[in-house]
Image: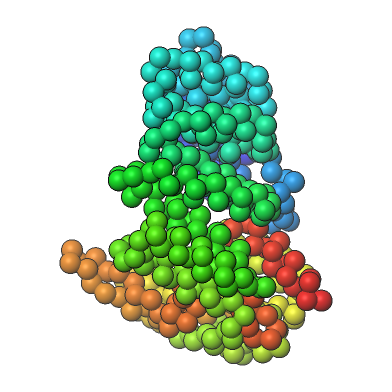
Amino acid sequence: MNRASCLRAALVMGMVVPAAAVAQGGAPEPDGYVYYRAGGCAQAIGRAEDFEGRTRNDTARYTAAGDTLPTIAREAARDCLARLSPETAHVADLVPLAQLYIALGDERAAGAVIARRLARPDAQAAAVRAWWLGQAAYAYIGAHPFRAAPLDTLLRQLDTLRGSEAAYVRVLVYAALSSRFELLMNDSAARRVARVAVAAAGAMVGHDLEEAKPTLLSLYLRLLDDVAKPPADTVAFGAILAQARAVIGRGGQWGARLDWAETMLRTYRRPAPRLVATQWLGVAGDTIQPAPGRATLVLFGPGRPVGAALRRLAHKYGARLSIVSVVRLRGYFKDEGPLDEHDEIARLEPYYVGELAFPGTIAVTETQFQKMFDGRRMAMPGANDRAYNGAGVVLIGANGRVERVWSQWNPTIEIRVEQLLDSRG
């Protein structure tokens, strides 16, 4: 049994196979279980897509045009639909069933199943109808490739609903759509949809508004970032920040996160602080970072998914680009611990430089912990975290000034870094 067939069989039977076993061609022991509910099938597709993303070939550079559902996921959907019938499906399975049809590109069947769910008497109240419209919209937002037309029909229906609960669903749906547009490199659409989402928050009250604050924070960060990066629009930045504070409030968890974001975004075009490290791994002698006279890409706490992109950037730009991965000591490594500093560092170099093949320099920093009331440890911000205000990824120009900051890695950053470096010649 080949790798794809093995994984597909495991998904259809509801089993989770370790990636190493699949890569070696090991077939699972079947337990005789097969999904007969659309919800389980939809989850199986998600697992297939996630597996494909984690094992993708290094040469498969992310592109918005390559936004397609992996073959193993489509085959899993086809196998499930062969056992399911829209006429006999349980009411709770109608939207997941539509998701299977969407995966196979059958828009007519998906639309018919969604319409059947929305026509039921229990879906006529605004709050309930908004919920089911939102679930259907999510299915289209996550579709590969992205299709706007059927989604627009659902959004128009959602926009007609009134009430705090319906507004809450609108915020969540439009936030998800804004994130999808960002991954599709359609920044103008991402901004436009983000504005629609924050406008919808005006109709929320009480518990709904509190529940939506994390989502609203991410939306305001997207809008703030757009006006903070060069050429900065300080007036627009101030106006958006004031609106965000009025909605999210000051103090508390989300108010503090907004303060952090403001500080992070105000680092654009400012001189980049020098990184500090307990030990430097990778490139011998490359301990002055950011590198003078070279562009520098700094990643805080990077993991396996970024390795391929970093290797491609290092190959393309060579000496023009210095790459620094900042890694914090934790007192353990994988399932080994507790470890002292020497023993942990001894495991980090074979992992990051060897197994993950990260290019550039690995800056290892010590971590200070604070004990919580229940005995658990909480990692405190280090010198680099404070200097870069908690950013996840930072691009520094050859002039030593901050060009771009991101709160965390996403697949489009590779392309955006290339665009910025190419524009500098």
Would you say 250 lies left or right of 187 here? left
**Camera-side residue of 125 and 7:** 125
Quarter occupied by the N terminus: top right
Say if 328 sits above or below 69 in the image: below
Q: Residue at x 33, y 79 (%)?
A: 368
Would you say 173 lies left or right of 293 here? left
Residue 7 in view, yes or no: no
Give the percent coordinates (x, y) of residue 78: 62, 23
Residue 205 in view, yes or no: yes
**Camera-side residue of 64 and 347:** 64
Residue farthest left in this picture: 373
Q: Residue at x 44, y 47 (%)?
A: 201
Give the percent coordinates (x, y) of residue 233: 61, 70
Give the percent coordinates (x, y) of residue 390: 46, 72
Say if 407 sits above or below 126 in the image: below
Residue farthest right in this picture: 425
Give the percent coordinates (x, y) of residue 130: 45, 30
**Camera-side residue of 108 and 345:** 108
Q: Residue at x 73, y 45 (%)?
A: 66
Picture colour scheme = rainbow
Q: Residue at x 82, y 76 (%)?
A: 425
**Camera-side residue of 263 and 107:** 263
How many numbered badges does the structure rendering display?
0
